[in-house]
Amino acid sequence: ENALGRFLGVREIVPVNSGSSANLVAVTTLCSSQLDNPLRPGDEVIVPAASFPTTVNPIIQNQLVPVFIDSNLADLNLDPGQLEEALSPRTRAVMFAHTLGNPADMDAVMAFVRQHDLYLIEDACDALGSTWDGQFVGTFGELATLSFYPAHHITVGEGGAVFTNRPKLAKIARAVWDWGRDCWCGYDSPVNGKCGIRFEREIPGMPGYYDHRYYYTEIGYNLKLTDPQAAMGVAQVEKLPEFVARRRHNFHYLYAGLRQYEDFLRLPQWHPRADPAWFAFPLLLNENLPFQRHDLTRFLELNHIETRLLFAGNILKQPAYQEINARQIGALPVADRILKDAFFVGVFPGLTEPHLDYMIETFGRFFSKY
């Protein structure tokens, strides 16, 4: 917690067992009755349709209403131009991921949330180390999330974190993370707890005091990270600057090598104020090509180059989301294009230039057939 907090320059790190759990904890925290103005069932949260499922699921799981907007074709992030159109009297929050480590337009997002007094949750699971105008993404809103899955910038095998500069939100998040109990401070040393009030909680109508280990102020879960994982994380954070530098190097090496194939591929773009710590290299097939995405990705996989689709694409086209209570803004053509034509390849720090040359050459062998 301390090491990662120092790296990001934030006060509070709440480690959890996955990035998906981090998103669940973050949204649930903002629904707490301990807040003066919590999210309530039926409130709306603006979110891109082209999202990872567990960026959207906590909204639904907390009985909130997702309002889906489209993405930009250039950076594959949410389209800030649709934020005002998505606004309604029930709008209370905005939640989105920085796609594959590429920061969204935070100037536009922050202007919108400040104007309308909205909560902001940044899903930074793919963006640890990315900055906007020199400021780490994830440090703009009330809460942000990270993933420590093996493919991410650092790993503890499986894990994640919620982070914030607001101690009250961190206290609620720790309750959500720890079965919902009021205090997480420990009770073995000293016996009375680090808070000093372990035996001073009261339950109305019951005489005497109640041990705060069994005093519940939130509807919580058990989503904690283990100590052995945290030990691994300490070592990983020490290496994080090197990991980020290697990812950036690998991204730009691939970018230079793939530019020769722009008749077939739309290469990623990023804002001049953004400095992405790339999680992966996103690609979009150009339109009206004589082959389909699966033809290319199958060829790459057969040649030992792993690929991933850009998560759910337009999530509203996925079977599980056909009957959810939601709104959408417009026809979502870019989200549909992502669903049809987008994929990504890796920029893992362990890749060397010979590996990257092989990747570039393999793309060329496929395109040479056309």
Image (cartoon, helix red, strand yellow):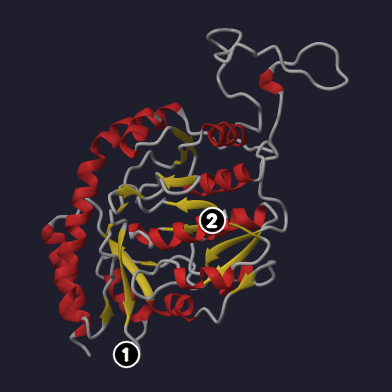
Residue furthest out toward the front: 115
Q: Residue 148 at what x, y percent from top left?
A: 39, 44
Secondary element type, mark 2: helix
Q: Residue at x 66, y 68 (%)?
A: 326
Q: Earlier in the sequence, mark 1 or mark 2?
A: 2
Residue 295 drawn at (x, y percent):
34, 81
Residue displayed at 25% across by 54% down: 348
Picture layout, residue 335 above or below residue 89: below
Label 2 is placed on what type of residue? Thr
- Distance from Cα at disc 1 to Cα at disc 2: 32 Å
For label 1, the SS is loop
Q: Quadrant of the N terminus?
A: top left
- In the rendered image, which residue does mark 2 sit on? 54
Mark 1: amino acid: Leu
Is residue 315 something one can see in this rendering? Answer: no
* Number of the front mark, 1 or 2: 2
Residue 263: x %, y % from top left:
23, 86
Crowding near the residue tagged with mark 2, few <14, some 14–19, many ≥20 C-alpha atoms within 10 Å:
some
Residue lying at 29% horizontally and 32% vertically, measured from the top left:
235
Residue 203 point in image, percent of width and height: 80, 21
- Above or below, comparing residue 34 to residue 153 in the picture: above
Q: Quadrant of residue 298?
A: bottom left
- In the picture provided, is 97 more to the left or to the right than 245? right
Image quarter hosting the C terminus: bottom left
> Is residue 199 in sight in this rendering?
yes
Mark linked to residue 289: 1
Label annotation for residue 239 = none
Of residue 34 and residue 239, the one placed in the foreground of this image is 34
